[in-house]
Image (cartoon, rainbow, N blue to C red):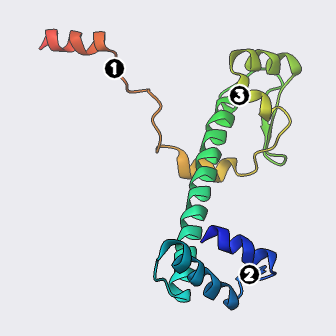
Amino acid sequence: LVGELMVQRSLGNQSDSGWKTVTWKPCSAKLKTELGAEKTPDMCKEHWKTVRARFLFTQIVTYLKQLKANYLIVKILHTKSGAGVQWNGAKHIMEAPDDAWDDWIASDHRVEAWRKKPFPLYNEIGDLVDGTHATGELALSISETQRSDVAE
């Protein structure tokens, strides 16, 4: 199906909003001749919609995971304090002296990207993410669990 869609695109049968109706009949014929699959043009069209929707869903999930990861990194910066260290809500960026940034980057290289890069969705992503991810805060080590077993 993808191969034939590439052919149809080269023939100008892909518009900005999707595929032209004439696209699906050659797709159906190609599937029949190459795979022996009896697929109607409408079936080809619906299959493509499903494939595209799954692809878009995967892209969205990947994007949301990246937003969450970015939020957690910027949140690390929010925990920093010191002279001249502050979150600029208007610019959506952490402001700090160069020596503070150098120390932060030395301890966690991931924060370097946020030295001059704004994160305008920080508060919104925080509302969606906080409380929904593991932090390790309540984790117990093996030795701690063994001690509690002995105490009982």
In the rendered structure, find residue 100 and report the number of the disc placed on it. Answer: none
**Residue that appears at 58% across and 47% down:** 65
**Secondary structure of residue under mark 3:** helix
Foreground: 89 or 135?
135
Q: Earlier in the sequence, mark 3 or mark 1?
A: 3
Query: Compared with residue 97, is residue 42 higher up or lower down, i.e. above or below?
Result: below
Query: Compared with residue 83, is residue 71 higher up or lower down, i.e. above or below?
Result: below
Q: Residue furthest front?
A: 33
Tell me how far mark 3 sits from mark 2, CA to CA: 38 Å
**Residue that appears at 76% across and 50% down:** 120
Kindly identify the amino acid type of the residue bearing the numbered disc 3: Arg
Q: Earlier in the sequence, mark 3 or mark 2?
A: 2
Q: Which residue is mark 3?
A: 110
Q: Position of residue 17 (x, y in %)?
A: 73, 81
Q: Which residue is mark 2?
A: 17
Do the residues under discs 3 and 1 have CB atoms within 8 angstroms?
no
Q: Which residue is mark 1?
A: 140
**Secondary structure of residue under mark 1:** loop
Foreground: 75 or 28?
28
- Left or right placement of residue 112 versus residue 30 in this view: right
Query: Residue 106: which quarter of the image?
Result: top right
**Secondary structure of residue under mark 2:** loop
Determine crowd level at label 3: few under 14, some 14-19, many 20+ residues with C-alpha closer than 10 A: few
Kindly identify the amino acid type of the residue bearing the numbered disc 2: Ser
Determine crowd level at label 2: few under 14, some 14-19, many 20+ residues with C-alpha closer than 10 A: few
Query: Compared with residue 3, is residue 72 higher up or lower down, i.e. above or below?
Result: above
